Image (cartoon, grey):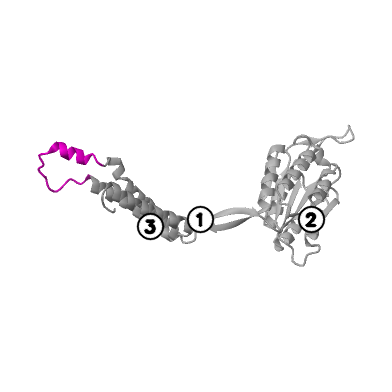
Amino acid sequence: MSFSSPVWLLGLLVVPLALLAYRFARRRPDRYAVRFTALSTLSLAAAGVPDRRRHVPAVLALAAAVALVLALARPHTTVRVPVQEASVVLVTDHSGSMQATDVAPTRLGAAESAANTFIDQLPAAVRVGAVAFSGSPDGVQAPSTDHPAARQVINSQTANGATATGDALSLALQLLHQGAKKPPPSAIVLLSDGAANTGQDPVSVARQAGSEKIPIYTVALGVPGTTISTPDPMQPTVDVSPDPQLMAQISQASGGRAFNAQDAGSLGSIYKNLGSQLGTRAVKHEVTASFAIAGMMLLLGAAVTSLLWVGRVP
């Protein structure tokens, strides 16, 4: 919860002062002693209202003060609602290093599963596209509400080749601009497990995306120090450690966020959260009226209970 006029919250400082004044008044000794010989009658009269019940009006009055002060501060809550129009392009690396098994069952298998989880979180109205790449982009689906078409590109990849991250990001930007004079809110989700080693500079492409208000959310997949065998048994294994530094540079240049995933569980969680985030938008709802009504009801309750149990308005 947040407040449009938080200065009014200073009024809450009155509440503890009022509570201390109330306790002081309750404990103050009577100024005059009154002689009363009919002690049995006095005892019956004093037992008419339990001591705890006599505190209820004061408690309700203090609660009413809190509610009314909060109402003056104009509180509002933020809720997330499905977006009516947006475009997202999933850019997935299927270079040779994606055959590594440090992420079960393989990096590529985990990436495909997580990408499908991502799409599951998106409302039907969100336009989804896909770019699969290795040495060049070789699987393309323009953003559309036909989500199964994007899934088909994602699920038909084979791990081989180099890593042309910049070319894939550039193609994703082109897809987001196709057929739209004014593109809807858009984003790119990039998953890669290694450094770009061919094609355009991905950071330069990310800067272009940032200038167009298209954030790139990057996920670096894999465990540092992982190696894979080469087809030639006489050759040494190849290091296929992820490159989170490059991915962080891409996300920062575009205004997005960078994530690291070293297992299938964390990758699935990242994609699920991203799907929920990109598929909804934050909307603020002012709840001043609710607090004002609650304050008035509490004041009414304080007055009624005071008249019934104490015999006067607090």
Can the viewer see residue 30? yes
User: Would you say 156 lies left or right of 87 here?
Assistant: right
User: Would you say 76 lies left or right of 161 here?
Assistant: left
- Which mark is in front, 1 or 2? 2
Q: How many marks?
A: 3
| Amino acid type, label 1 | Ser
Which residue is identified by label 1? Answer: 2
Q: CA distance from mark 1 to mark 3?
A: 16 Å
Of labels 3 and 2, earlier in sequence is 3
Which residue is identified by label 3? Answer: 11
**In the displayed image of the protein, which residue is found farthest to the bottom?**
181
Which residue is identified by label 2? Answer: 144
Secondary structure at badge 1 equals strand
Whole-percent x and y of residue 133?
83, 49
Q: CA distance from mark 1 to mark 2?
A: 36 Å
Check whether the beta carbons of the residues at disc 3 and disc 2 lie within 8 A of each other: no
Q: Who's the residue at 11% across and 45% down the image?
A: 34
Front in this rendered view, residue 124 or 202: 124
